Amino acid sequence: MKTREVMKEMYESTWLFCLKRVITLPFVLLGVSIMTFLFIRFVPVEPAEVILRLSGVTPTAEAIQALRSELGTDQPLSIQYFIWLKGVLHFDFGTSFVSKLPVAQEIVEKLPATFELALAAFVCIICISIPLGIVSALYKNSIFDKIVGLLSIISVSVPTFWLGFFLLYLFSLKLGIFPTNGKGTILHMILPAVSLALPAIGLFVQAIRTSVIEELQKYYVQYAYLRGLKKSVILSRHVFKNAAIPLTTMLGMTLGNLLGGAVIVEQVFSWPGLGRYLIESIINRDYPVVQCYVLIIAIIYVFANLCTDILHRILDPQLMMVRGRE
C-alpha cells in the first residue's frame, strides 16, 4: 500500500513539475524574442543604408529617410518590436536584403541540411562515446583508459575549424577518400559530421566514464555481488541505467550545440545549410536573416532544455521525490 502511495506521489510531482515548466515557457520565449530584437537594433549600422547600397542606390539622407519610413524603422523601438513580433507569430521574419525573398522561405529550404548534419554528428557521438566511456570505466587506469583520456583531451582542445581543414586535407586532398565539399551522397556527410562531433565525443567519454565509476562504487553494487548476481546483469540492469540519468542533460543540450556549432563546419566544407547561410548574411549585412537565425537557435535551446529537464525528472525517481515537496 505504501508503495502505491509513493508511486502516486512521484507521478503527481512529475506532472506538476512539467506543468510549471510549460506555463513558464511563454515568458521565456518572450524574453528570447526581446533579446533577439534588441540584438539587431543595437548594431551601429542603418538597415536602410544597407538596403540602398545592396540595390546600387546612392544612400543620400533623403533616400535613407524615405526608406526608413517605408520599413517603419523611424518609429519608437516598442512599436517596432510589436510589429516585428506580430510578423514572427505569423511566421513572417521579413525579407532578405540580398535575395529579396522572404527569410522564412530561405530558412525552411536550408534548415533540413543543417538538421541532417547535426543528426549525423549526434549519432556519431552516441555510437563512439558510450562504448569508449564504459570500457574506460571498467578498465580504470589501464593503458586503454589512459589513451582514451589523452585522445579526449585532444579532441576537446583542437579548434573545430582547424580539425575540419585537417580532415579535409588528409582524407580528401591527400588520400582522395571523401569529396572535398558540397552535399550529395553519404560520403559528403562523413567528414563534416566527424568534425562537428569530435569535440563533444571527448566530453561525453569522460562524463560517461566518471558516471559509471561513481555507480560502481555505490553500496547497491556490492550488495548485488553478495547476492550472487552476475556481473553482466549488475552492469546492464543497474549500473548503466543509473549512470545514464545524469547524462540526459548533456544529451538534450548537445543537439542545440551541434546546430549552433555547424556554422563553422558548414563554411569549411561548403555544406548548404543554415550555418553557411548565416556567414554569407553577416558578410552582406543581411540583418533579417541574422535575426531570424538567432531567434530559431535560441528557441531550439529553450525547447531542448525543457525536454531535458522533463526527461531527467522522469528517469530519476529520487529527484521526483525530493522536488515533489518543493
Image: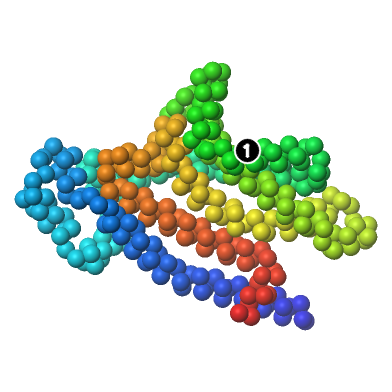
Residue 68, image x, y percentages: 14, 54
Q: Is residue 186 visible?
A: no
Q: Is residue 161 left or right of residue 233?
A: left
Please identify the quarter of the rendering in which residue 300 is found. Answer: bottom left
Question: Number of numbered discs present?
Answer: 1
Residue 319, image x, y percentages: 66, 70
Q: Is residue 245 left or right of residue 101?
A: right
Q: Which residue is rendered at x = 49% and y = 24% of the image?
A: 179
**How is the rendered protein coloured?**
rainbow
Classify the position of the N terminus by image quarter.
bottom right
214 versus 14 height, above or below: above
Q: Is residue 296 visible?
A: yes
Which residue is label 1 attached to? 154
Residue 13, image x, y percentages: 61, 76
- Amino acid at dot 1: Ile
Near-viewer residue (18 or 264): 264
Secondary element under disc 1, as helix, strand or loop, is helix
14 versus 243 height, above or below: below
Q: Which residue is rendered at x = 76% and y = 44% of the image?
A: 136
How crowded pointer 1 is (Cα within 10 Å; few <14, some 14-19, many 20+) is rated as some
Q: Is residue 215 left or right of residue 50?
A: right
315 versus 160 height, above or below: below
